[in-house]
Amino acid sequence: MLLRLFVFSALAAVLFSGPVTAATEAKAGPVSSLENGKEINGTCAACHSENGQGGKKGEYPRIAGQSAKFIESQLRSFRARTRINIPMFPYTQERELPDEDIKDIAAYLSAIELPTKMPTFVGNEDALTRLQMVDKVMIIPRADGDLENGGKIYQKQCVACHGKTGKGRGMFPMLAGQYTNYLKRQVDLFLKGDRPHDEEGMVGVLNALKESDIQDILAYVTSIQESQE
Ligand code: HEC
Ligand code: HEC
């Protein structure tokens, strides 16, 4: 009995020592923040796509090109459940995503640039390069609404935080270049008090607007995605 146990543990030691040491070595090696971010993105890509473009018409939001600070703050909110995100919750748990990884994945995603225009080819690109260039283009379709009214309200009430061209900064997310469906869903969550919009608390700037005003703002935001800051 004792012998069998010994043989088993010796066998186990032989069987398992290989992969274990390999994993330890890989961890000990110098992995740059960028490589680490890229590796973590493999997990995120299952829903948000390889280039962080999101998908399914905004069921999964675009996360590429958002400010690193905002991405970090959202991952922490998901982890702490101050912002409820059931699909993402398991990935944000401490063991899955420690603070260091949050920094690396946020930096990686925020550096991805998604052009808003189809590329012009020089002529010497191979098919794969062309495919990759086209694949990165992200153009949000124009949403219906009164652009003039939406623009007026946006420039008065949203611009201070989300920026003149909707690109956001720091803790304020970009709105231009994000799926309209996604933004609308977030506004509904804010209005219901299910997600805090800003330090202002549960009742703020959005609650004072008519539903048609919000639609007009979202339409306006789709009209400014190509403009420069
Ligand atoms: C199983 C699918 C899934 C995976 C995997 C996933 N996400 Fe998400 N993520 C979502 C969904 C769904 C939402 C939108 C939730 C909502 O509507 O409030 C979201 C929202 C976000 C947001 C908020 C964006 C915004 O503008 O408000 C960030 C940031 C984010 N995810 C980052 C990540 C990162 C980084 C990873 C990888 C570590 C990841 N996600 C993995 C499904 C996923
Ligand atoms: C005082 C600053 C401030 C103002 C003004 C403001 N916002 Fe925001 N907004 C924020 C912050 C901060 C967040 C991110 C909240 C969080 O951390 O979850 C946000 C998030 C959003 C989001 C969700 C984006 C995402 O990717 O998750 C939408 C949509 C939005 N704001 C719309 C608006 C509109 C429309 C207006 C004008 C009527 C407006 N906001 C005015 C600060 C502001």
Image (cartoon, rainbow, N blue to C red):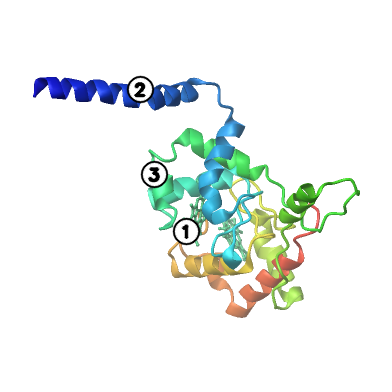
Label 3, label 2: how far apart the Cα atoms are: 28 Å
Kind of residue sitting beneath label 3: Gln
Q: Nearer the viewer, mark 1 or mark 2?
A: 2
Instruction: Looking at the picture, tell me which residue is in the foreground, 89 or 156.
Output: 89
Q: Are marks 1 and 2 in contact (CB under 8 Å)?
A: no
- Is residue 151 in view? yes
**Residue at position x 32%, y 22% in the image:** 14
Residue holding disc 1: 196
Quarter occupied by the N terminus: top left
Residue holding disc 3: 93
Give the mark nearer the N terminus: 3 vs 2. Answer: 2
Report ligand 2 position as a quadrant.
bottom right
**Vertical relation: 225 (above or below) 40:** below
Label 1, label 2: how far apart the Cα atoms are: 49 Å
**Vertical relation: 16 (above or below) 71:** above
**Residue at position x 43%, y 64% in the image:** 194
Element on which disc 3 rests: loop
Q: Residue 134: x, y in percent?
A: 76, 55
**Residue at position x 77%, y 51% in the image:** 133
Q: Are marks 3 and 2 in contact (CB under 8 Å)?
A: no
**Vertical relation: 177 (above or below) 207:** above
Q: Are marks 1 and 3 in contact (CB under 8 Å)?
A: no
**Vertical relation: 3 (above or below) 214:** above
Residue holding disc 2: 17
Residue 90 located left or right of residue 73? left
Residue 108 located left or right of residue 93? right
Q: Residue 164: x, y in percent?
A: 74, 57
Kind of residue sitting beneath label 2: Ser
Kind of residue sitting beneath label 1: Pro
